[in-house]
Image: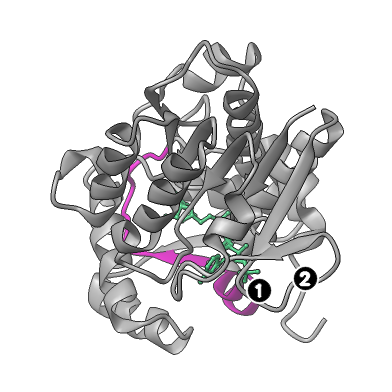
Amino acid sequence: MSTFVVLGASGTVGSELARGLEAAGHVVRRTTSRTPAAGQVHLDLVSGRGIDEALRGADGAFLLAPPGFTNQDVLLMPVIDAARRLGVGKLVAMSAMGADANPEAPLRKAELALEASGVAWNVIRPNWFMQNFHTYWLQGIVTQQAIVLPVGDARTSFIDARDIADVGAALLQRSEFNNRAFDLTGGEALTHTEVAALLSEALERPIRFEDVTPETMRPLLLSAGLPADYAEFLLVILSFLKAGYAERITDAVPSILNRAPRTFVDYARDYREAYPQSATR
Ligand SMILES: NC(=O)c1ccc[n+]([C@@H]2O[C@H](COP(=O)([O-])OP(=O)(O)OC[C@H]3O[C@@H](n4cnc5c(N)ncnc54)[C@H](OP(=O)(O)O)[C@@H]3O)[C@@H](O)[C@H]2O)c1
C-alpha cells in the first residue's frame, strides 16, 4: 500500500484517478484549493499554500495545472521542487498533446523542470477530452442543439478522461515506464460532424455541428466567464486542431493499459445523463 497525492481530485481526470488508486488499495490525499472537506487536503497552486504538507511522506503525486491559467510553469514548479526536497518517489504530470512543440510554452517549461528534477517522472499529454462536450461545450448543445466551434472538418483523436486517469494511476504504481512522456489519444479520429451524429444517436435527439470563425467564438468564450488570456489561448489551440494537429493516433493507451481505448460511442452511452434535455432541467 502506498500514499499518493492527487491534484485536481475533484476534477474530470483527478476524480477518476483518485478512485482508481483507492480501489487498488492505496491511500489517496485529494487536494483542493478550497476549504477542505473530509478526505481532502488543502493545496493552492496560486498562493503556494499547503504544498509541503500535502506532499510530506507521500510515495507519489499526480500533478496538473487547473484550466483558466496560462502560467502553468509558475504554478507547478514549487510542487516539483517540494517533491524533490521531501523525497517523493514519483511524479506523474498531466500536460497536453502538442505542449512539447514550443520550448518557451509555459506547459513545456513545467515538463522540462520535471524532467530535470531528479525525481522519477512521467508526463502524459492527452489530446482533447471527450468529456469536454458535457463540460466546456454543453451550453451550446443544450440551448442550440449544436456543437459550436471554429474547427472546420479537421479530425481529432479524442480521448476519454477515464482512460487518462487509468494511465495516470498505472504510471504512479509502476516503474517500468519511468522518465518517459506519452501522447495519449483515443483509437479513432473523428470530425465534429461525426461527433454530433454519435451524440444525436446516443441522446436520441438531433445535435448538429456549427463551424464558426474565431471572431464569432471569442465573445462566446468571454461571456462564459473565461479570463481574456485563457480565451485567446483556447482560440490558438483550437486553430491547431483545425489545422490537423489533433488527428494523430498513438498506441500509448493500449501499450500501458494492455487494452483498447474507450470509443466515443462508449463515452456517449455512459454520459447520457450529463446532457439535460433543456437548460431549465
Ligand atoms: N480538456 C481537455 O480537452 C484537455 C486536453 C489536454 C490537456 N488538458 C489539461 O487538463 C487539465 C485539466 O484537467 P481536468 O479537466 O481534469 O480538470 P478540471 O475538471 O477542470 O478540474 C480542475 C481541478 O483543479 C483544481 N484547482 C482549481 N484551482 C486550483 C488551485 N488554485 N490550486 C490547486 N488546484 C486547483 C480544482 O479543484 P478545487 O477547485 O477543489 O481546488 C479541480 O479539481 C489542464 O491542465 C488542461 O490543460 C485538458
Q: In this view, does 262 lie above or below 107?
A: above
Q: Where is residue 37 in the image (x, y as percent from the top left)?
A: 81, 71
Residue placed under numbered mark 2 in the picture: 276
- Which of the numbered marks, if any, corresponds to residue 142? 1
In front here: 207 or 274? 274
What range of the chain is rendered magenta? 139-156
Q: Which amino acid does label 2 sit on?
A: Pro
Q: Is residue 94 visible?
A: no
* Image quarter in which the C terminus is found: bottom right
Secondary structure under the numbered disc 1 in the rendered image: helix
Residue positioned 23% across, 38% down in the render: 100
Instruction: Say which element carries label 2.
Output: loop
Judged left or right of residue 56, residue 181 is left
Which residue is nearer to you in this view: 214 or 163? Answer: 163
Task: Tell me whether the residue at label 1 lies in contact with that at label 2, contact meaning CB atoms closer than 8 angstroms.
Answer: yes
**Residue density around tag 2, few if under 14, some if 14–19, many if 20 or more, within 10 Å:** some
Q: Does the residue labelled 1 lie within 8 Å of ligand 1?
A: no
Ligand 1 closer than 8 Å to the CB at disc 2? no
Name which residue lies at 40% across and 79% down. 221
Q: Earlier in the sequence, mark 1 or mark 2?
A: 1
